[in-house]
Image (cartoon, helix red, strand yellow):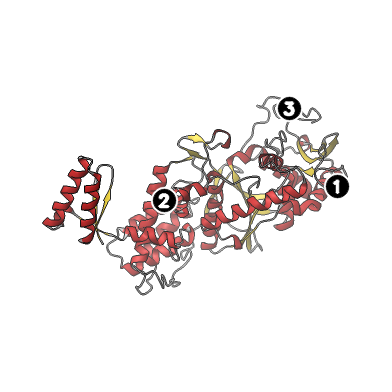
């Protein structure tokens, strides 16, 4: 099978022709809201909490960026322009979000037996940032359309923001650094409806007893031998101020969408809101907050410490295409906890290959027209808070529609893939091999010649007798007659070559 001149994209119908409104769940208020831009704003300003690059990102981490990619694609499909920013945290993120423990980058240096200094920290960050970018590209995320600011490149902006908070009376200095005074911000904890009064006093105070209040958080950590010079001595900014300062520098004082994992809600994102709104005096800091639920592995929490962790490289090593993993992510709603298993991934790979096979099979047909009725159903689902499982269900229903011409079916698949991002229009070689496997013509046993059926029966008996050499020889005879066999646990499939 040749795969040259794979597709001609049809642009006669694209985007959201009926203008179906987009509704998104806003964690701030815990409700579904219609997404629209404020007056005189032309571009969606979106910030996605990015990785701390002290190691390889596991599949749970990567699912976050498939979610934000689908979000950006949906916004663009609906006619919005998007400026997307994903930060790279290359210092300052302690092992506890509550300002406790060891710096994660330092932990990474020790793990790899590298001397703990700023030069090596930069080298470690470069190494794992490169791997992160490669993984994003394998998942069909266009890194060229995203800005990736590094926290270490915005030290002056972070220092300036801390100085503003100190001058306004929102921060205080201790022997260990500078802290944000949460008592000065009456709306602290509003994101996610955090009940501060219901938490034990001192629940977040461990080794550092200089905090005035249990939820105060570090803006500048000065009890360290690493970092940068500042008005408060040698040290480095806290993890939370990094994001606020980068957002302010790259996107402005107010943004439209801020995303992260659900684990960011109680501390990190509430801290961002408090320090950003206190510094700028503008409310809200972000109009929408969206959070992705966790992915488990075989029902257990992803944890490097217990070995319950899978990387994209593991997925590929096991013979699965990276976009099969993307399809698996799409099969669960982003706000629903989901489970990874190798069986589920195999099923997703089969579904992905079938979609690709349809497009490849009809690749030489003239461009069709996107079926408007199915497009309307698809957009309704995706614009209902990114209902990707529902959108996939629409696709499989459309495939069963016998009234559609092959040209229009493919036009619909390629149009919808502008959001799903399965790269159906220009698959790589590995995906084409999967598609070729799905395009094999399966033959029922009753439709085979007596000669071929007899050889198959003899082979099955040889397998039962554990006469493997004879079984292999019979397979070769069947292959010479133009048929291939696919053995499963309790079945046998026959394909015409």
| Near-viewer residue (110 or 236) | 110
Please tell me whether residue 393 is drawn above or below residue 295 in the rendered image. below
Between 88 and 372, the residue placed more toward the observer is 88
Observer-side mark, 3 or 1, equals 1
Judging depth in this view, the residue of 219 and 120 nearest the camera is 120
User: Dot 3: within a 10 Å radius of its alpha carbon, few (fewer than 14), some, or many (20 or more) residues?
Assistant: few
Q: Position of residue 79 (x, y in %)?
A: 54, 64
Q: Residues within 10 Å of mark 2 (few under 14, many from 20)?
A: some
The outermost residue toward the top is 200
The residue under label 2 is 390
Q: Which residue is mark 1?
A: 229
From the viewer's perspective, tell me whether residue 108 is left or right of residue 301: right
* Image vertical order of residue 411 relative to residue 150, above or below: below
Q: Circle 2 sits in a helix, a strand or a loop, which is it? A: helix
Direction bottom: furthest residue: 366
The answer to which quarter of the image holds residue 6 is: bottom left
Q: Is 20 above or below relative to 62? A: below
Front residue of 229 and 20: 229
What secondary structure is found at the residue carrying circle 1? loop
Tell me the tag on residue 116: none
Q: Earlier in the sequence, mark 2 or mark 3?
A: 3
Give coordinates of residue 402: x percent, y percent: 27, 62
Question: Picture coordinates of residue 24 (x, y %)?
Answer: 54, 50
Query: Which image quadrant is residue 1 in?
Result: bottom left
Residue highlighted by disc 3: 206
* CB within 8 Å, label 3 to label 1: no
Residue 285 in view in this figure: no
């Amino acid at each position: 099978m040749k795969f040259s001149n794979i597709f001609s994209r049809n642009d006669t119908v694209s985007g959201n022709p009926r203008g179906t409104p987009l509704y998104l769940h806003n964690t701030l208020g815990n409700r579904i809201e219609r997404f629209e831009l404020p007056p005189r704003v032309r571009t969606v300003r979106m910030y996605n909490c990015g990785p701390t690059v002290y190691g390889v990102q596991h599949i749970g981490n990567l699912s976050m960026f498939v979610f934000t990619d689908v979000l950006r694609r949906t916004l663009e499909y609906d006619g919005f322009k998007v400026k997307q920013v994903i930060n790279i945290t290359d210092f300052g993120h302690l092992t506890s979000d509550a300002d406790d423990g060891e710096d994660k980058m330092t932990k990474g240096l020790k793990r790899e037996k590298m001397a703990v200094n700023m030069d090596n920290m930069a080298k470690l960050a470069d190494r794992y940032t490169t791997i992160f970018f490669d993984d994003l590209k394998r998942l069909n995320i266009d890194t060229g359309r995203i800005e990736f600011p590094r926290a270490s490149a915005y030290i002056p902006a972070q220092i300036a923001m801390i100085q503003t908070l100190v001058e306004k009376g929102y921060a205080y200095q201790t022997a260990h650094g500078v802290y944000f005074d949460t008592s000065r911000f009456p709306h602290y904890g509003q994101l996610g409806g955090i009940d501060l009064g219901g938490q034990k006093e001192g629940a977040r105070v461990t080794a550092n007893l200089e905090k005035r209040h249990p939820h105060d958080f570090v803006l500048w950590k000065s009890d360290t031998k690493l970092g940068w010079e500042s008005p408060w001595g040698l040290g480095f900014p806290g993890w939370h101020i990094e994001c606020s300062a980068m957002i302010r520098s790259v996107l402005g004082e107010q943004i439209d969408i801020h995303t992260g994992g659900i684990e960011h809600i109680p501390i990190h994102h509430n801290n961002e809101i408090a320090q950003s709104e206190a510094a700028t005096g503008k409310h809200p800091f972000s109009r929408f907050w969206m959070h992705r639920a966790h992915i488990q592995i075989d029902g257990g929490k992803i944890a490097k410490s217990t070995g319950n962790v899978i990387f994209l490289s593991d997925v590929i090593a096991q013979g699965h295409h990276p976009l099969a993993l993307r399809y698996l992510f799409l099969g669960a709603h982003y706000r629903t906890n989901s489970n990874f298993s190798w069986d589920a991934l195999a099923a997703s790979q089969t579904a992905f290959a079938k979609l690709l096979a349809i497009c490849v099979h009809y690749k030489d047909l003239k461009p069709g027209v996107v079926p408007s009725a199915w497009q309307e159903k698809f957009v309704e689902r995706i614009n209902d808070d990114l209902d990707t499982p529902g959108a996939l269900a629409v696709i499989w229903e459309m495939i069963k529609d016998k009234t559609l011409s092959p040209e229009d079916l493919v036009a619909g698949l390629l149009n919808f893939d502008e959001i799903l991002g399965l790269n159906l229009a220009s698959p790589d070689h590995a995906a084409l091999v999967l598609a070729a496997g799905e395009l094999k013509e399966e033959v029922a046993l009753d439709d085979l010649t007596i000669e071929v059926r007899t050889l198959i029966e003899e082979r099955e008996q040889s397998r039962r007798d554990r006469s493997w050499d004879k079984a292999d020889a019979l397979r070769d005879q069947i292959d010479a007659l133009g048929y291939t066999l696919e053995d499963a646990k309790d079945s046998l499939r026959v394909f015409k070559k």
